Amino acid sequence: MNLTYGDYLCVPQLTSLQRPLSHRPDSADPEHDEMLFIIIHQVYELWFKQQLHEGDRLAECLSAGQVPEACATLQRMLTILKTMVQQVDVIETITPVSFLSFRSFLANSSGFQSAQFREFEFLLGNKNPRVLTHYPEGTPDRVAIERRWGKPTLFDAFAKFVALRGYPVPAELLTRDVTQPPQEWPAFQETLLDLYHNHPTERSVCELLVDLDEGIQEWRYRHVKMVERTIGFKQGTGGSPGVAYLRTTLFNPLFPDLWAIRTRL
């Protein structure tokens, strides 16, 4: 079999997926910047797919107590996350006036509808039941998000990791309702303080999780400011709340215990 680069990567199919819907007032050609808008969001969807792929592996490694594998996976996720944040610089080359030239053609579509991003949020522990209402029952997106809703989060995998390494973890934490949002566990914080002071291997895992948490918060901040500089406080596409809602998502830690112990180290 003569397998070519294009065949392996499905390049013809991939480059046929950019289909601008706009048209210039004096021409049948689409608005110039719509192509970039489509490509950047398609790239984000590919990165979400990879982050889900890596995040599932991370959960497996943590749950099995595999330190080198967990750290390597976290490093990869962090590197991808940096790329995702830097890509905001690219989309910000679309000026507000240019975006408005094709915004109306987006109709009811909105980034709020990204099912993969919702899956990623659920994996990270940010579970909001209202998200499910945005996807009709029985659709592939709804089924995928519902599956994530009932699965343990990365925080649950981390708690299991600490227990497997032989350190005390509250039973209530290990058996908690995994659909609930992150919260602080004071008894668990005592164990984390011990890890930081006396167990460098486990401390390195903790610090990588803090890096991930901080990176997600940075991504959210850059996303909010990108939307704000593009449309201000207008309603988002598809009727989404826009910046007003996005601001409420800022600075909500995924691993609150790892932040809470900082003042006691």
Image: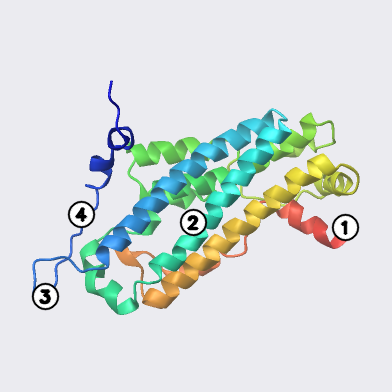
Front residue (pair 94, 174): 94
- Residue occupying image coordinates x 80% and y 45%: 203
Q: Please tell me whether mark 4 sits on a helix, a strand or a loop.
A: loop
Q: Amino acid at mark 1?
A: Leu
Quadrant of the rendering where the C terminus is positioned: bottom right
Q: Is residue 25 left or right of residue 38?
A: left
Disc 3/disc 2 C-alpha distance (Å): 33 Å
Q: Which residue is mark 1?
A: 265
Which mark, by number, is residue 84?
2
Q: Quadrant of residue 96?
A: bottom left
Q: Which residue is mark 4?
A: 19
> Could you say where residue 26 lies in the image, as x and y percent from the top left?
8, 75
> Could you say where residue 149 lies in the image, as x and y percent from the top left?
51, 40
Check disc 4: other Cα within 10 Å, few if <14, some if 14-19, many if 20+.
few
From the viewer's perspective, is the residue at label 1 or at label 3 nearer? 3
Q: Which residue is mark 3?
A: 25
Number of on-image labels = 4
Q: Amino acid at mark 3?
A: Pro
From the viewer's perspective, is the residue at label 2 or at label 1 nearer? 2
Question: From the viewer's perspective, is residue 60 above or below residue 92?
Answer: above
- Residue occupying image coordinates x 51% and y 44%: 51
Q: Earlier in the sequence, mark 2 or mark 4?
A: 4
Question: From the viewer's perspective, is residue 193 above or below residue 265?
Answer: above
Q: Residue furthest right?
A: 198
> Could you say where residue 244 lies in the image, as x and y percent from the top left?
47, 71
